[in-house]
Amino acid sequence: MRTKHLLVAAVASTVLATAACGSAPAADPAGTAGPATTITWQTTGGDATEYEKKAFQEPFTARTGAKFDNVTSLNYISQLLTMVEAQKTIWDVVHTGSYLAKQYCGRLFESIDLSKYKTDLVPPGTTTDCSVPAVKYATVMAYDTTVYKGTVPTSIKDFFDTRTFPGKRVFFGGTPRGIVEAALVADGVAPDRLYPLDVTRALAKLSTIKQDIIFAPSFTAVQQSLVNKQATMTLTLNGRLGIIQDSGGTLAPVWDFTSWDFDSFVVPKGSPNAAAAKQALEFTQEPENLKKYAALSGLTPVRSDVDPNTIEFSTNGKLFNPFVGQGKGTVSLLDPTYWAQNSTDITQKWTAWQVG
């Protein structure tokens, strides 16, 4: 318990010290984005930051004159909790997942004017008072074509058939999202009857191949396991599969059951440039900006008026994208409301099962 308290204190000290060393520059008159505005944008880092710069930030600067300061934090929710509680928020835009946007709307994230967004062009249940979905991605099953020839995997059930398809399976062990759903469908649950999730049943199904699972500590480790042939089958994000293929992977997708999820951009409570940040959020939702971001990242706009078949994805980005082309089987949304309400409990069970 003492260690936990020290960790929380350390995070708080870091955040408050950062705020004390220099607050964000003042916004332009009336809070609108302009040359005097610097929007602090929290992102996932690496290539993702570069994609957001090119697709959203640089064009927004060209339109308004506003500048951006990008920051990356793997524990951004913990940092936001500290900032908001201390009333020392120093970020203006946050890139976050679907269930987190729903879970923390009103507590950590500012409300937005939904009348400024085309909410009729996104699936029901994907908006909140604080967010509109931007881009979607999927958890896709794939196998190594150099290992499985002739008789190859064709269904999600084959992921659990180690007799016909021997070899290690790998996925990111940090989250059960998408994995639990796949296990249940493989065990006979209809995709439209998944929720509420029978987590006990899903873990029992996963236990049948537990000795053949590699629980990767990161998506990079998933990539290494597949490129190095330590694993021959995976359930992982479609964007990552494109990267793996570009890095020497020899994979093919299985279009049977695939789950999808989405990310949103939100404004944290107490943002020093909230009005300008909300302008930037509206800008990210413009179709041409979404298409540019999609082409760079391999992700897919959620808006129904943006045809993914018109986006210039890379060859490998298109290969593993369930939203492009036809005949991609069942593609089901991970219920954001259910996960917002149950993520903590399910993750605890997932972690206990892994180490048990």
Image (spheres, grey):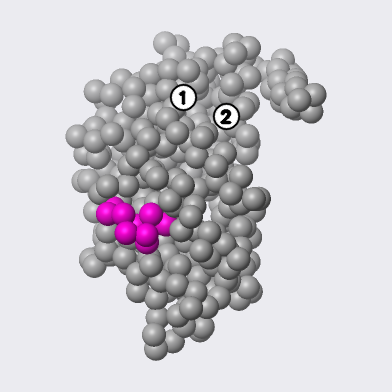
Residue beneath the point at 57% across and 16% down: 84
Residue beneath the point at 19% across and 34% down: 120
Magenta extent? 182-191
As drawn, 308 above or below 350: below
Q: Main secondary structure of the magenta part?
A: helix
As drawn, 326 above or below 116: below
In the picture of the structure, the residue carrying the numbered disc 1 is 104
240 or 45, which is in the foreground? 240
147 or 279, which is in the foreground? 147
Q: Dot 2 lies on which element?
A: helix
Image side of residue 250 versus residue 157, left or right: right
Label 2 crowd (10 A; few <14 / some 14-19 / many >=20): some
Contact between marks 1 and 2 (CB within 8 A): the answer is yes
Among numbered discs 1 and 2, the one appearing first in the sequence: 2
Residue beneath the point at 35% across and 57% down: 185
Say the numbered circle drawn on residue 77.
2
Task: Indicate the amino acid at tag 1.
Answer: Tyr
Q: Marks 1 and 2, Cα distance to the nearest angstrom?
A: 9 Å
Label 1 crowd (10 A; few <14 / some 14-19 / many >=20): some
Q: Dot 1 lies on which element?
A: loop
What is the count of numbered marks?
2
Image side of residue 338 versus residue 207, left or right: left
Choose top left, top right, bottom left or bottom right for residue 5: top right
Whether the magenta-drawn stretch holds residue 197 is answered as no
Q: Position of residue 67 (x, y in %)?
A: 53, 30
Q: Quadrant of the N terminus?
A: top right
Task: Indicate the amino acid at tag 2.
Answer: Ile
Q: Position of residue 61 (x, y in %)?
A: 46, 34
Choose top left, top right, bottom left or bottom right for residue 134: top left
Q: Position of residue 24 (x, y in %)?
A: 60, 19
